[in-house]
Image (spheres, rainbow, N blue to C red):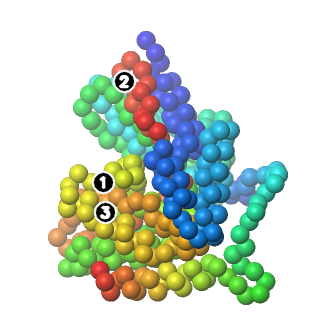
Amino acid sequence: MVLYECLWVYEVEEFGPLTVTIDAQGGNLTAESKKNIEANKEKILKEL
Amino acid sequence: MKDIAQVVEDTAAKLLKIAATILPSEVKEALITGEKETEGSLGKSQLIAINENVGLAEKFSKPMCQDTGLVSFFVKIGDKFPIRSEVKTALIKATKRATEDVPLRPNAVDMFEGNTKNNVGIRGFVPWFYFDLVEGEDCEIIALPKGGGSSNVGKMKMIPPGKGIKGVKEFVVEALAAAGPLACPPYAVGVGVGGGEDMCMNLAKKALLRPLFEYHEDSKISEIEKELLTTLNKLEIGAMGLGEGPSVLDVHMEFAARHPASLPVGVVISCWALRHAGATIDEEGNVEWHPH
């Protein structure tokens, strides 16, 4: 029985800079983006 | 006389390597244009990283993404092409070989036995084949390894036929809004309409193979493709879902006839790494690589 499904092992150098999408102070870019997309969707559906 | 089955295997293995490591030129161009035109620094930084990554993958002949996809082949076999069922065997061998050589990530997981480690399902079906029979002496092979993340946001719906084309558009908007930031945008979108519940998804996937910015030959359909491209970008998904830059690079649609009581719509979404590569082999085993 093979337990893993998909794994790579990486060796990285000079990795980054990275974008922090969820920070320790409650900031969440993904959640904000989803909210904006949802609002835009409602607007688009009315105009179709 | 060349060993045709061997030529098919070698060609398919190389197609999987090309697909995994080099983006089709029009996709590369679209991402570079996206980077230039994106004003927000958050979105721009994502596109800069994507384009740098695409360049490095090509330069070092390494996969552009850790997810090298679930392998499928679109194959057209000419009446006079010397082999037929052997093509299937050769494509399976090519998939196993490319898994070692490229390397591709082993992405075929059996529900009960785990990862098969070679991208080939132990119960058949993977790689998946779309076979077509055509006139002539050639065999055309297109490899489409599709990432799992963007396949996860694919959607199918049987719409009440009374909703018509407006219903189709609404469902595409809903599908893309639901995909949102989840599947590595900017996306390429394939839409299949009609057929049956399975065929609309097949058509949607096939629509992804049409080069970006090449629209349907029927102007009634190409107008909807262009309209949806503009509409979907108003969702403001943005590069990698951060709200800045392009959300969708292009939308392609294919239509089939439908049952009077049904209006099946399939939406297949590709991440920015829209990977496919093709070649045509003639009856003597000469290979012509499609422009990439």
Q: Secondary structure at mark 1?
A: loop
Q: Is residue B61 above or below residue B216?
A: above
* Crowd around label 1: few <14 · some 14–19 · many ≥20 (10 Å): some
Kindly identify the residue that appears in the image at 46 percent across and 39 percent down.
B292
- On residue B225, the disc is 3
Q: In the image, residue B1 lies at what x, y percent?
A: 43, 12
Chain assignment, label 3: B
- On residue B99, the disc is none
Q: How many marks?
A: 3
Q: Secondary structure at mark 2?
A: loop
Q: Secondary structure at mark 3?
A: helix
- Viewer-nearest residue: B52 or B176: B52
Q: Residue furthest left?
A: B260
Chain assignment, label 1: B
- Viewer-nearest residue: B158 or B270: B270
Seen in the image, is A38 located left or right of residue B228? right
The residue under label 2 is: B282
Seen in the image, is B259 located left or right of residue B278? left
Q: Amino acid at mark 2?
A: Asp
Counting residues from the N terminus, which is met first, the one under dot 2 or under dot 1?
Answer: 1
Counting residues from the N terminus, which is met first, the one under dot 3 or under dot 2?
Answer: 3
Chain assignment, label 2: B
Q: Residue furthest top?
A: B1
Residues at circles 3 and 1 in contact by the CB criterion of under 8 Å: yes
